[in-house]
Image: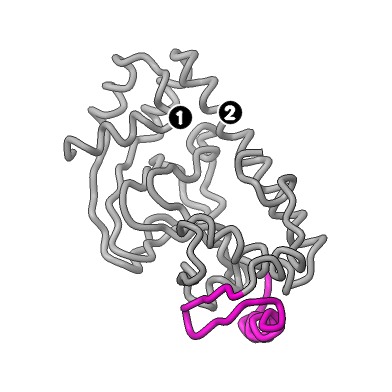
Amino acid sequence: MRPGDRQDIRQLELFRDMEESNFDRLMRGAYVHNFPPQVQLLTQGDPSDFLHVVVEGSVELFANWDKRETTMSVARPVSTFILAATIQDAPYLMSARTLERSHLVLLPSEDVREVFAKDHAFARAVVSELAQCYRSVLKDAKNLKLRSSVERLANYLLKWQKIQGGADRFKLGLEKRRLAARLGMTPENLSRSIKALQPHGVEVDGAKVNVTDRAALEKLAKPTPLIDDPSC
């Protein structure tokens, strides 16, 4: 493990307050890997053998059923994914693959559960993270059920613009077919939604976005912390 990896993982809220000896226990059993793009890391239905930590790169979490596939979310540094399956010793409900060259740390699920059972600070952090994940799922459901496709795209662009530093020009962050799946629409519907945003201060050329009138975009999107603020 690179010297910086341990520090990056330790700074995550999940591991920040746990006892040093228990953190050492997790790190001793950890596996460190560099993966090229488009490598499938795990498959839905498989046993949850590892808790994954994304240190560099990005990982798409996706699901499929009856020859259909959809993007559920994207994990970016530094974060973990599929914690619930690890704690419950349950099958993965999603699959995962790298979107770009990625550096990951894999913590054996058995070790995570062992430390969870004896480290109270770690257990509280796990409960807090799972609660946050639950609230994120509720926000996603509200976003899908209460907003039109154009409104969902508008709010995604506002959120992603902020993540990218607030500049008027930025990139979409996902290729369009994955973005469409993430927002609960077809690629054709995404194309129509992009065109529908032009009168509201948005120009999209391939993966490049130019927000020419943020006030107009916000007026259309009507963002609310109860759906759009990840800290709420």
At 51% from the left and 69% from the top, the residue drawn is: 168
**Residue at the spot of label 2:** 128
Q: Is residue 97 above or below residue 3?
A: below
At 39% from the left and 58% from the top, the residue drawn is: 58
Q: Is residue 69 above or below residue 231?
A: below
The x and y percentages for residue 22 are 33, 18
Q: Is residue 88 left or right of residue 144?
A: left
The x and y percentages for residue 53 are 37, 43
Foreground disc of the pair 1, 2: 1
Q: Residue furthest left?
A: 2
**Residue at the spot of label 1:** 13
Residue 68 visible at all: no
Q: Is residue 212 above or below residue 88?
A: below
Q: Which mark is residue 23?
A: none
> Residue 30 or 17: which is nearer the viewer?
17
Residue type, label 2: Ser
Quadrant of the rendering where the C terminus is positioned:
top right
> Magenta span covers which residues?
184-212
